[in-house]
């Protein structure tokens, strides 16, 4: 055997070995198939130049696969971590659906990029990266305002699609509309697909760095677009984006004249841990007390059925899960997330924001769960479980297109999950618990130490739970009184309102309630099904903007 | 020769070799002498235990010396760097004297420490360090205010000694008095004597990190001292400390209710480069036009005399320099610094802040320079130089105790020089230039690229000149209008007033002039020689504090 042949065989052996490291079936099979095909196609090559080329290609492939393996192993660790942590797991504030049925706005896909420093707060790392944003001047006139969305944990185009309010009011102000993607999400990855691969790459994922990105971007827009030099900037954001909008005005009042912070739980880090689950319960309770009773009793039913291996398998079959259940906790966490998500997107019209959903999904869920078609016998665990399953179809299979369900995801997984896991393991520890009495969940205390340990295992970091109130305030609500020009809107149906600013602490920090509103309903485009309170909130924000820019 | 003897000899040889690496005569001789004495004392030892002990001690000494060498080599590099950069060198805002005659306040030496995170803005580095501060409750009552000094580039005790205003007004408010040492200065060194040894250790020296230290310290004081929970905090600072005071209120209005920012050149980074040297010139001009003419003509005289090797030597002798001059630039830079420093501390009474100085040092300097005792002949270079030398005695040898002068230092060198060199190579690029027409200096343009290159050679960083206005504002003065409760005081004699806020941009951001005042005169203790304007400025600040805490 000549040396080239030996090198070839060694290389392919490496390739096969790396491919088999993928623990996800789809990835593994795909790469193994590719390697095998390449090997068969090229094994009879004679021309030395061709052989060298093919070897070079294979070597490059090996590197790509090695990177992918380390990346996917990392993702898997996160998922495993999550599934044992229950309420104590990092809860994403927003998850944007990649449903095929979602609204798509072409204006949200005309991307630009700007070169940003990876580390704004130190000078020894001089790396840069490309941050993505969209900028629309269709109705903008010289000197008129810039409406700026402070991107949160996901692809910016999807937030852009779902923030119709900014597009709706742009003509009123002849405004420019800008959506900026948050670093480490979407395609704004400081170290490409290695961004989450080690602590040295991930360390620049903080709210502070993101805000500095936005300040640089706006400085660039002001100085590079003729007529924009003096354009005042209004910042918008929903959920974590709403927190960023508030923080941006708080920390950079020299950059933005005012903020519309929608459903921004800036006090969540200091809010009692049970608050979130009580609001979720309240949302279902207003639809049906019987529904809440059934949900509350479902946990025991699931525990009893799933206490044996065969029972666990039966649960998997009943729920039509794609993969065998490893534990009842896996199923319960999936349901726990679902209830929170239904409450968040309990909108008065069909949406595709988190998933394809009907109007008032909590109502439809409860109507399914309490349906008389199903028999209701006391202590019949399987009946209870069947009712919950009928409910879950509202969230997971409203369009009837799904054949089986993956408990690892709510809708579609994305880099966002990874990023938010890191952020909640560092700056944004949002304690979650339930008692099973004042809410419809199991008794689940909050355990900071366990949470911190899980963070360390996963990311080699520990959270500093006090950092947000040191840096941004909010330990006492009155601490916020020196900030100005922030409109805090919160829907009473939104479980995140538990950490929202719902009291006006200074005249220029109005807390605007949205009765009948779920998670940042007010940021969505106008809809004829909107409750009156959201119309009023929007009018109020428009009036405030007029004041801020005058 | 047995193996112990061999080891001993090898060790001593290492020790001598390391000692000879010291380029400073004093250090080198001291260590060589110590090593020689130890060697002689122990060479006849017989007891193996004793020999082992002595060897262990020698080994430890070797390590200490190696560390010192690397540290001092680093210092020397800085000094060399500085001496070739002229106006373009980093100019320290404040230099605190270690003169034996300086004021010492025992309350400034009751140190406490607090454990701080080395990196507040990231989570992957979990190192901590001990930050030093003083805290005095002599006149404090429960719930009453905290007067907090945001330490700048030096030992905190010396700023504490020289900020009598805070001590003077503490009884009016029954206030607690706290002075916090800035990280990387004094004894608050995140990585001990290695803090400046490599970019990975130095990277946490930023104003942002310092402010976060202060926010954590105040949170700790609020939560650990009974009765202080609701005590409002007023922040004070002079010079760079004044910048920090302003920034602290700007970025942390939830922590401090107001700021007295004395002589804080927060606009220096965007101020025309010639402004500083024009104010220095103005200070001398108001004493004597003839004095300014002589200073202006001195540069040519020095250049001509120093153009030959013998002339250079003659200059060194005339100026009584401790070490031979390497170039005329070395001498001119030393004088350049001196003029700036005289202008900064042109106080109306004798002080020991920068050095031991008479009242009105610029006046005394000019009186010496223009003295009729010296002959004044046109084109007599040596006469001009002798006049300047008579002037320099005001600054460098007012007490007559100095035998020779070191051009590497203005008064006494300290870690502060090293730290400020880094800070001006990263965040605080303050452009300096002169034209020789509108000022009394040589024509020296500002060269950002040369400055940036020198920074890279020295620290492996490059400045981001735009960062302060991105982060703190000030590109346009009106950008500051959304901040509040900051009193900006600036003396008209102070060259740093060129970068001060001297226009009131919002009612709660008063610009308070101090006519006849040099660098943060208003922060010093009351003195019967104080000009009326400084009394008025202090009264105004007291009235503002009353308003802020009400």
Image (cartoon, coloured by chain):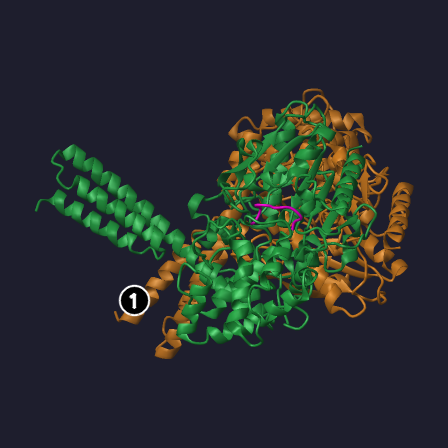
Chain colours: A orange, B green
Q: Quadrant of residue B288?
A: bottom right
Image quadrant in which the C terminus of chain B is located? top right
Q: Percent position (x, y) of residue A144?
A: 85, 62
At 68% from the left and 50% from the top, the residue drawn is B263
Q: Percent position (x, y) of residue A531?
A: 89, 42
**Above or below B229: residue A507:** below
User: Any magenta on residue B68?
Assistant: no
Between residue A274 and residue B467, name the one nearer to us. B467
Which residue carries the number 1 mark? A6
Q: Secondary structure at mark 1?
A: helix
At 81% from the left and 58% from the top, the residue drawn is A232
Q: Which residues are magenta?
A: B347-354
B505 with respect to B118 (left or right): right
Direction front: furthest residue? B373
Q: Specify the principal SS of the magenta part.
A: loop
Is any atom of residue B116 visible in this view? yes
**Above or below B246: residue B79:** below
Q: Quadrant of residue B2?
A: top left
**Above or below A259: residue B460:** below
User: Any magenta on residue B353?
Assistant: yes
B24 with respect to A262 (left or right): left
Between residue A324 and residue B359, name the one nearer to us. B359
Q: Percent position (x, y) of residue B363?
A: 64, 56
Q: Chain of mark 1?
A: A
């Amino acid at each position: 055997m000549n040396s080239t042949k030996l090198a070839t065989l060694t290389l392919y052996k490496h390739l096969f070995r790396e491919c088999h490291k993928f623990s996800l079936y789809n990835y593994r099979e795909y790469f193994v198939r590719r390697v095998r095909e390449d090997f068969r196609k090229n094994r009879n090559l004679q021309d030395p130049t061709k052989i060298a080329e093919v070897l070079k290609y294979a070597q490059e492939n090996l590197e790509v696969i090695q990177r992918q393996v380390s990346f996917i192993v990392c993702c898997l660790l996160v998922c495993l971590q999550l599934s044992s942590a229950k309420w104590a797991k990092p809860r994403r504030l927003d998850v944007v659906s990649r449903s095929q049925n979602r609204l798509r706005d072409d204006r949200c896909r005309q991307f630009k990029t700007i070169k940003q420093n990876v580390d704004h707060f130190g000078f020894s790392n001089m790396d840069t990266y490309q941050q993505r944003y969209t900028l629309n001047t269709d109705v903008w006139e010289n000197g008129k305002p810039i409406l700026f969305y402070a991107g949160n944990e996901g692809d910016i185009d999807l937030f852009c699609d779902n923030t119709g309010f900014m597009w709706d009011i742009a003509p009123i102000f002849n405004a420019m509309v800008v959506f900026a993607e948050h670093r480490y999400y979407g395609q704004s990855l400081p170290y490409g697909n290695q961004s989450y691969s080690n602590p040295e790459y991930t360390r620049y994922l903080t709210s502070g760095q993101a805000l500095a990105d936005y300040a640089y971007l706006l400085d660039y827009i002001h100085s590079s677009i003729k007529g924009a030099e003096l354009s005042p900037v209004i910042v918008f954001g929903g959920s974590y984006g709403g927190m960023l909008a508030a923080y941006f005005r708080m920390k950079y009042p020299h950059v933005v004249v005012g903020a519309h912070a929608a459903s921004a739980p800036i006090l969540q880090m200091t809010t009692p841990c049970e608050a979130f689950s009580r609001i979720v319960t309240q949302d279902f309770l207003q639809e049906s007390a019987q529904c809440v009773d059934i949900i509350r009793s479902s946990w025991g039913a699931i525990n009893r059925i799933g206490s044996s291996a065969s029972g666990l398998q039966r649960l998997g079959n009943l729920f039509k899960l794609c993969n065998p259940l490893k534990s009842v906790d896996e199923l319960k966490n999936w349901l726990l997330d679902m209830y929170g998500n239904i409450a968040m997107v309990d909108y008065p019209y069909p949406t595709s924001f988190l998933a394809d959903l009907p109007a008032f999904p909590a109502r439809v869920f409860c109507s399914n769960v309490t349906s008389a078609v199903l028999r209701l016998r006391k202590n019949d665990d399987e009946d209870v479980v069947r009712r919950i399953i009928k409910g879950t179809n509202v969230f997971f299979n409203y369009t009837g297109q799904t054949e089986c369900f993956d408990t690892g995801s709510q809708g579609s997984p994305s880099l966002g999950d990874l990023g938010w896991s890191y952020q909640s393991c560092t700056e944004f520890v949002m304690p979650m618990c339930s008692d099973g009495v004042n809410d419809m969940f199991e008794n689940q205390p909050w355990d900071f130490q366990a949470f911190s340990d899980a963070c360390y295992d996963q990311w080699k970091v520990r959270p500093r739970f006090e950092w947000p109130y040191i840096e941004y305030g909010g330990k006492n609500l009155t601490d916020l009184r020196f900030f100005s020009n922030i409109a805090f809107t919160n829907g009473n149906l939104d479980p995140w309102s538990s950490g929202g600013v719902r009291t006006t602490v200074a005249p220029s920090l109005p807390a605007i309630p949205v009765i009948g509103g779920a998670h940042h309903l007010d940021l969505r485009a106008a809809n004829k099904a909107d409750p009156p309170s959201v119309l009023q909130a929007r009018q109020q924000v428009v009036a405030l903007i007029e004041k801020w820019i005058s």
